[in-house]
Amino acid sequence: MKDLVAKLSASDRFVDAATHICDASREAGVYQCAIMLHATSGPPVLAVDNFPHISDDHRLYSVSERHWPVTRDRAALDSCAP
């Protein structure tokens, strides 16, 4: 864990930090890991994963506006908040 914390502390970019988390999860026996950076409006703008059998087309869909339609309407998003 200390090694992961050191790597995260030294990471300058989201992609680097997410990669370290996915690598550490694999070493801990977790089969798949995905880390998403979301816009303030809700949808993800960047994703990092270590899914071995997922196509790039699926990855692109997972961050597309088509996959996150409710977030286009900020009022609808706010109405879902606790």
Image (cartoon, helix red, strand yellow):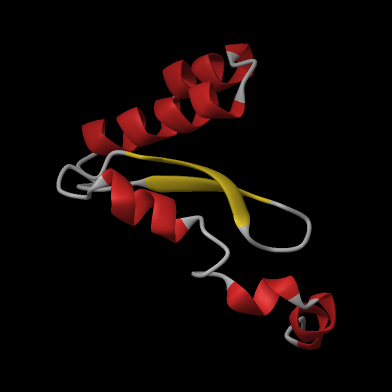
Tell me how many marks there are: 0
Which is nearer the eye, 54 or 33? 54
Which is nearer the eye, 60 or 75? 60
x 47%, y 20%: residue: 2
Q: Residue furthest top?
A: 10
- Assign the C terminus to one quadrant of the image: bottom right
Q: Quadrant of residue 71?
A: bottom right
- Assign the N terminus to one quadrant of the image: top left
x 41%, y 50%: residue: 60
Q: Position of residue 66 (x, y in %)?
A: 52, 69
Left or right placement of residue 5 versus residue 75 in this view: left
Which is nearer the eye, 27 or 42? 42
x 31%, y 51%: residue: 57
Q: Position of residue 53 (x, y in %)?
A: 15, 48
Q: Position of residue 20 (x, y in %)?
A: 42, 25
- Residue 77 vertical position relative to residue 41 in the rendered view, above or below: below
- Residue 29 vertical position relative to residue 66 in the rendered view, above or below: above
- Residue 74 vertical position relative to residue 5 in the rendered view, above or below: below
Q: Quadrant of residue 51?
A: top left
x 47%, y 45%: residue: 35
